[in-house]
Amino acid sequence: KKGIWKIFDPIVINGDLNIQPGAQLLFDENSYLIVKGNLMAKGDQNDKILFNGIKNNWKGIYVINGKNISILDNVIISNTTQLQEGMLNLNGGVTFYNSDVEIRNSIFSDSKGEDALNIVNSNFLLKNVLFNKIKSDAFDSDFSKGLVIESKFKNISGDALDFSGSISNIKKTNISTVSDKAISVGEDSLVEI
């Protein structure tokens, strides 16, 4: 529900999760969110949904095996690190695995993980998404298919967009202040820019 929620322990949802506009989820440094289903986080311009750390860093979001399409709209995700817990070792601050996703009108900032957003074996749409102040790679697509449109990548210390085994189109997208590659296309990927 809308409001400020402080989260001190990991949360694992066996099913779909719906987050209402205006919800602010603030995570302790050892906490994270796993959704074994679909994530629906649809805010609006005046009531954005916020995922952030209570003090600074937290272990991020993992969405796995969604049967439908997860949607993030008007969402801000900040200060994520990699999710390394027991046998789970994820590179992304936010990871979608076997889970189709549409992300619109959203911001990823201050990510300290290897990837701010990692999409694996999924279909995706990124539209009007800003990646800013990313310590390593901003967006990593592995064995996925999708579209990046009207988005911005700036202040990226690694690659802005990194594709492996993927098919993608990039349209009307601005990339600036990148320390490594603006776009990296490898491992049998096909990307139209």
Image (tube, helix red, strand yellow):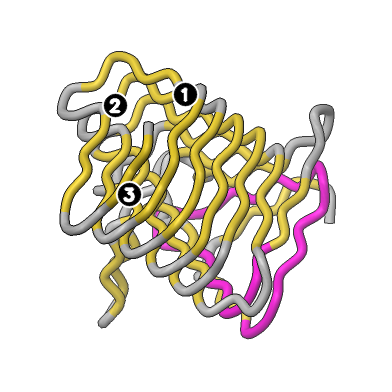
Q: Looking at the picture, which amino acid does disc 2 mark?
A: Ile
Does the segment drawn in magenta span residue 31?
Answer: yes
Q: Name the residue under label 1.
A: 173
Label 2, on which residue?
A: 156
Q: Mark 1 belongs to which amino acid?
A: Thr
Q: Earlier in the sequence, mark 2 or mark 1?
A: 2
> Disc 3 vs disc 1: Cβ atoms closer than 8 Å?
no
Whether the magenta-drawn stretch holds residue 108 is answered as no
| Numbered disc 2: secondary structure | strand
- Could you tell me residue 137's position as x and y percent? 27, 40
The residue that appears at 68% across and 73% down in the rendered structure is 68
Q: How many residues crowd around disc 1 within 10 Å: few (fewer than 14), some, or many (20 or more)?
A: some
Q: Compare marks 3 and 2 and give the one earlier in the sequence.
A: 3
> On the image, numbered disc 3 is attached to which residue?
140
The residue shown at (44%, 41%) is 169
Which range of residues does the magenta coloring cover?
A: 14-39
